[in-house]
Amino acid sequence: DIQMTQSPSSLSASVGDRVTITCRASQSISSYLNWYQQKPGKAPKLLIYAASSLQSGVPSRFSGSGSGTDFTLTISSLQPEDFATYYCQQSYSPTWTFGQGTKVEIK
Amino acid sequence: EVQLVESGGGLVQPGRSLRLSCAASGFTFDDYAMHWVRQAPGKGLEWVSGISWNSGSIGYADSVKGRFTISRDNAKNSLYLQMNSLRAEDTALYYCAKDKGAEYSSSIDYWGQGTLVTVSS
């Protein structure tokens, strides 16, 4: 199976900060990489699909980049509603896998 | 409005079986692949299984392969997960989820609210 490793596992940031989360795949997955946001007690929400495409309705402060094995989710200016856990997920292989998650907390 | 409503969760003893169902509405069900994703209490997301629009492609996580079976009934707009030989580590909130595409090679754009499965004696 393809392993997905996110870093960091958690981070503290302030409103207005630029935040970057990294996801690394154990083998090349081309651009078959998605990002989700999950808030406590809620279902996940799709933010970015195919590595860099913004899902409809998602604010433009979210962006994704990368291909092959290394990917990045960037929040250009962190807002209060962005404090949540973020997951990457690969859909390259028939067995999908998620990263372990990155929790974004208030500094 | 897309709606995915899971049912069938509950408390079950180790080694027993359970069948989850997901009723879908608000979209053309047989145009899209579907998935089950689970989340153990306080843990991250784990993809469990996916099925293409016509059931032609099916996949499972290694942790459930040989014990769980995914299926769909397009006439009933329903997705199912038959779970056999349940273990304590299968305890989780199970989400029904819709793929953006017909073959499960895309992403999940809609999620249900989940049904809780607890495996314990």
Image (spheres, rainbow, N blue to C red):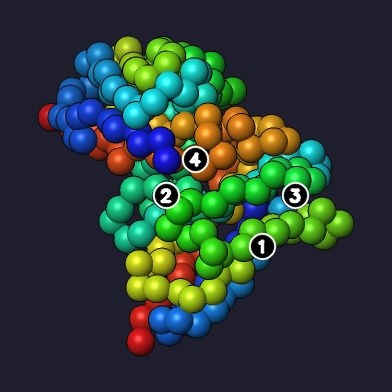
Q: Nearer the viewer, mark 3 or mark 2?
A: 3
**Residue neighbourhood size for the residue with mark 3, other residues' Cα within 10 Å, grouped as few (<14), some (14–19), many (≥20):** some
- Residue to which mark 3 is pinned: B55
Alpha carbon distance from label 4 to label 3: 17 Å
- Can residue B89 be seen in the rendering of this structure? yes
Asked whether the beta carbons under mark 4 and mark 3 sit within 8 Å of each other, the answer is no
Q: Chain of mark 2?
A: B
Asked whether the beta carbons under mark 1 and mark 3 sit within 8 Å of each other, the answer is no
SS category of the residue bearing label 4:
loop
**Both labels 1 and 3 in a single chain:** yes
Alpha carbon distance from label 4 to label 2: 9 Å
Name the amino acid type tagged 3: Ser
Q: Which mark is residue A96?
A: 4
Name the amino acid type tagged 4: Trp
Q: Nearer the viewer, residue B20 or A61?
A: B20
Alpha carbon distance from label 3 to label 2: 21 Å
Name the amino acid type tagged 2: Glu
Q: Which mark is residue B46?
A: 2
- Residue to which mark 1 is pinned: B80
Q: Nearer the viewer, mark 4 or mark 2?
A: 4
Q: Reading the chain from its start, which is encountered first: label 3 or label 2?
A: 2
Q: Chain of mark 3?
A: B
SS category of the residue bearing label 3:
loop
Q: Going 64% across and 59% down the picture, which residue do you hit?
A: B70
- Can residue A105 be seen in the rendering of this structure? no
Name the amino acid type tagged 1: Tyr
Left or right: where does residue B72 sit relative to residue B21? Answer: right
SS category of the residue bearing label 2:
strand
Q: Going 73% across and 35% down the picture, which residue do you hit?
A: B102
**Residue neighbourhood size for the residue with mark 4, other residues' Cα within 10 Å, grouped as few (<14), some (14–19), many (≥20):** many
